[in-house]
Image (cartoon, coloured by chain):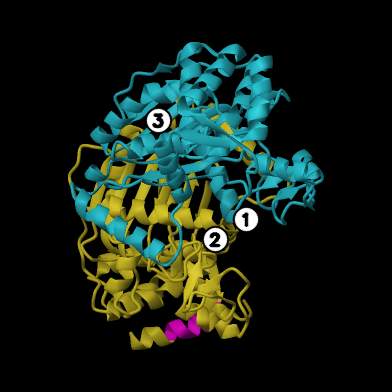
Chain colours: A cyan, B yellow
Amino acid sequence: MSETVKLTLDEIQELSLTILTKSGFGPDHAQAIADLLTTCQIDDCQSHGLFRLFMCAQTMRTGKVDGNAKPIVAPSDDAVVRVDAQGGMSLLAFDLALPILIEKTRTHGIAAMAINRCFHFSALWPEVESLSAAGLAAMAMVPSHAWVAPAGGTRGSLGTNPLAFSWPRQGKDPFTFDFATSAVARGEIELYRRAGKPLPDGIALDKDGNPTTDPTAAMDGAMLTFGSYKGSALSIMIELLAGPLIDDLTSLESLEFDGGTAGAPYHGEIILAFDPSRFSGGRVAENDARAERLFADITEQGARLPSQRRFAARAQNTARGYVEIAKTLHDDLMALKDQA
Amino acid sequence: MSETVKLTLDEIQELSLTILTKSGFGPDHAQAIADLLTTCQIDDCQSHGLFRLFMCAQTMRTGKVDGNAKPIVAPSDDAVVRVDAQGGMSLLAFDLALPILIEKTRTHGIAAMAINRCFHFSALWPEVESLSAAGLAAMAMVPSHAWVAPAGGTRGSLGTNPLAFSWPRQGKDPFTFDFATSAVARGEIELYRRAGKPLPDGIALDKDGNPTTDPTAAMDGAMLTFGSYKGSALSIMIELLAGPLIDDLTSLESLEFDGGTAGAPYHGEIILAFDPSRFSGGRVAENDARAERLFADITEQGARLPSQRRFAARAQNTARGYVEIAKTLHDDLMALKDQA
């Protein structure tokens, strides 16, 4: 970032709440979104921080999202908690069902949360880290809009379909990753376009299904998955588990539902949680040590664990009490605040 | 394959049972392994068919595996079935716990099988397809030996760590994939070495941690994961879920346990199963149709679903009643049969 603006955590909250409220989000949703954006900004996760306010405001402008939706948890006595977001943003639904997921995981050893009928704009790592903070391992998956071609294909069938995972570590930041199964994030292609730079090879197809390095042609065409046919297979698995398994939309259906209004994707989400104590027969300390030995073997050879940069930012920003964002983003947010 | 030999399914069974029995496997293990190898050969899955008899025989020669081990299922009333393979090959343990996993999945919606203390040489797709044949979705993961470097690393910390997934389709072969998270299978590097051909870029490191295209240097060094840091993160997740979560060894520990004896890896395995009926609130038909629309959108654009080649081989080989294997493999198996 060249020129930056410093914001305290209170300032992030105030700016977010103002924009969200003026956009049409009721107080509960506005607070949940503001809290999430703050969490992301503390970690310098710029792609999923305040920048997402534009998508939140745009989604409200589509007239499809309910800014006052009250999620409903379906009663269940099995290991699955189903929560209907009632056409609102996903976060309140997750928050409502989280304690139930934790309880079910401790009871059954493994459990799942299925969120239905939600608009989704957020990073998944804060959710899986809510579970690792409770001593559980967790995996989360969501579809998105069908902008990504399967391996060997010519057009978008799949979403950017992120997969996130978190593993609790005693007295340390968790082992966490959260990555899109597309080769790059869609926002990155836009950054290449603005910079007038060609894309790397193997990232995208044009509208006729031919490989392209032209960002504009890529935005009109489709992205590719990471990791060729393996990444493509993984992306299809995410469609199935976070879509048809839980009675919710695929990325193809989400894009149709959007109807060109450029709102956040509308679909479901699945979160799996695992209780190490139950799975290991109570031998958590011995197995923590085993996991730590693996992490040490990785870092001792100079490799980084995922999220290490994010945790370093968290430590720095928490200590100094402010975060930095690009001045260009801040300018755009000020304009959004005035127009929202 | 240049020159081939035709084998009926009975001949596969007889050859397998003879070699396994002479190697020291008791009748239960020999039959379970022979059945699995037959299943793989019907699908022309050459890498995990009869070829694996060499690894089975070698593992017995290490003196570490128990050819008569009787797996034990731990009683549980939660959603996790734990089965101790008692130091035998993994297959009997899976077979014993499979009906319990299916029952637990139907009861709880989601359930898991943890296999402990097993030697493992087999493909995972037959296991996840056992579950999709019962109408459940399933995911399976295992570590192996620490031959794979993490992204940014210089030496092996991770196994080839396969991930398999299967989704049931009404009246059709399931959607199934089963891939190593290493860039290539270890056997492929050996094939390049034998052929005197250089490896593609980005596959392997030499013993000093430098990129290499020399197959011999790669065998002394480490493989890389597929998909760069994303594949590496996925591989670490598999280590954690199929290792410390379930109180069993990592790939680092498995390689140490092997102590240079070149046996099959020794560790645990985790299998997750999902009941579409419970997750979807009984709306299975509607959601099957949704999944089928996604599959159709993928295949209509000329992309292949994973395992399509395998299912085509299954249909052909089942119809004609025999399979074909390379004559060189058959010659080697005849020699193994005499010496075992």
Q: CA distance from mark 1 to mark 2?
A: 9 Å
Please check whether the numbered discs 1 and 2 fall on a single chain: no
Per the image, label 2 sits on a secondary structure element best described as loop
- From this viewpoint, is residue B11 visible? no
**On-image quarter of the C terminus of chain A:** top right
Q: CA distance from mark 3 to mark 1?
A: 29 Å
In depth, the one of B336 and A300 nearer the eye is: A300
Residue B104 percent coordinates (x, y): 29, 38
- Residue marked by disc 3: A113
Q: Chain of mark 3?
A: A
Which residue is rendered at x = 71% and y = 49% of the image?
A153
Residue A333 percent coordinates (x, y): 64, 25
Residue A228 tag number:
1
- From this viewpoint, is residue A282 visible? yes
In depth, the one of B266 and B302 nearer the eye is: B266
Crowd class of label 2 (few under 14; some 14 to 19; many from 20; radius 10 Å): many
Residue A208 left/right relative to B23: right
Q: Amino acid at mark 3?
A: Met
